[in-house]
Amino acid sequence: MRAIFFVLLIANLAFFSHQYFLDAGGEMVSSINQETAAKSDSKNSLRLLSEVNGQGDLTKRAEGIAKAKSTENEMKSSELCTMLGPYEQLLQAEYAVERLNALGASAHISPVEIQEGESFWVYLRPEMSEKEAVRRLYELQKKNIESHVITKGELTNGISFGRFAEYSDAEVKLNEVKSQGYEVEIKRLPKTIQETWVVIEAGFAEKVGDSVWGDLLSKQPGLEKRQNFCLGVASQ
């Protein structure tokens, strides 16, 4: 009996040992497989990243080509146009456009603003409201200071003491109002006039002969022929 007991004990130990090493081996194989899969995924990720970078390079290249084309178009659109003017009468400008168009030249009338000196505005800074501005005006007029409320623009609800062609005159007014205890300021304003010009598009002036130019320029004293960029035509 004792011999049978030892035989069974040895058999059980052998069985459990076999099962233990079998499970450990399976876990090791599983771990190796997982590690191999992880490395494979990493390689795939790197490959995808390179593809993305490649697509990014292509996108940048396409953007660069588009920008270059845009710059080229801007350069073309900023060619020199020929200008004829300034005309005192719109009718004379219209006649010139009709004649130029008849010769195959693309021409149109363009109003041009020309800066011609400055004016000088003496004023008080805007009040918080229209009511406050009226109150300030009433206060000034009681002191016999000629003034009025500014009703539009960036100085709305301010007080104006007039605009002057000469800075020295504006300064006299400034000192006069300041002597009454008010913080007065001077604002420089550009004086502009609008001139009428005929603009001939780039490449069309060559279709007009010298005799025609001479005839057009003789229609009115002071007319001149000049060239300027077709974009933002004609500011002096």
Image (cartoon, helix red, strand yellow):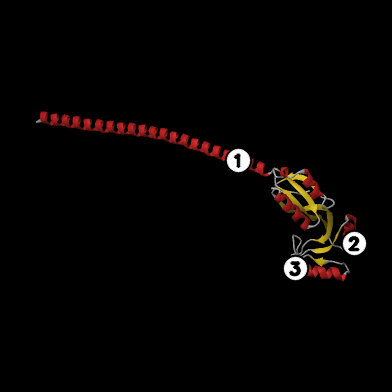
Task: Please tell me whether mark 2 sits on a helix, a strand or a loop.
Answer: helix
Q: Which of marks 2 and 1 is in front?
A: 1
Q: Which amino acid does label 1 sit on?
A: Lys
**Relative image position of residue 69 (x, y in whole percent):** 60, 40
* Depicted 195 relative to depicted 65: above or below: below
Report the disc number at residue 69: 1
- Please tell me which residue lies in front, 104 or 57: 104
> Disc 3 designates what residue?
130
Measured in 3D between alpha carbons, the distance from the residue under mark 3 to the one under mark 1, in whole angstroms, is: 53 Å
**Relative image position of residue 30 (x, y in whole percent):** 31, 34
Q: In which quarter of the image is the N terminus?
A: top left
Q: What residue type is labelled 3?
A: Glu
* Depicted 152 relative to depicted 67: above or below: below
Measured in 3D between alpha carbons, the distance from the residue under mark 2 to the one under mark 3, in whole angstroms, is: 25 Å
**Relative image position of residue 201 (x, y in whole percent):** 70, 47
> Disc 2 designates what residue?
176
Q: What residue type is labelled 2?
A: Glu
Return the disc, 2 or 1, that comes first in the chain's sequence. Answer: 1
Report crowding for label 3: few under 14, some 14 to 19, many 20 or more residues within 10 A (C-alpha): some
Report crowding for label 1: few under 14, some 14 to 19, many 20 or more residues within 10 A (C-alpha): few
Q: Is residue 79 left or right of residue 2?
A: right
Report the disc number at residue 178: none
- Please tell me which residue lies in front, 197 or 140: 197
Q: Is there a contact, CB below 8 Å, between mark 2 and mark 1?
A: no
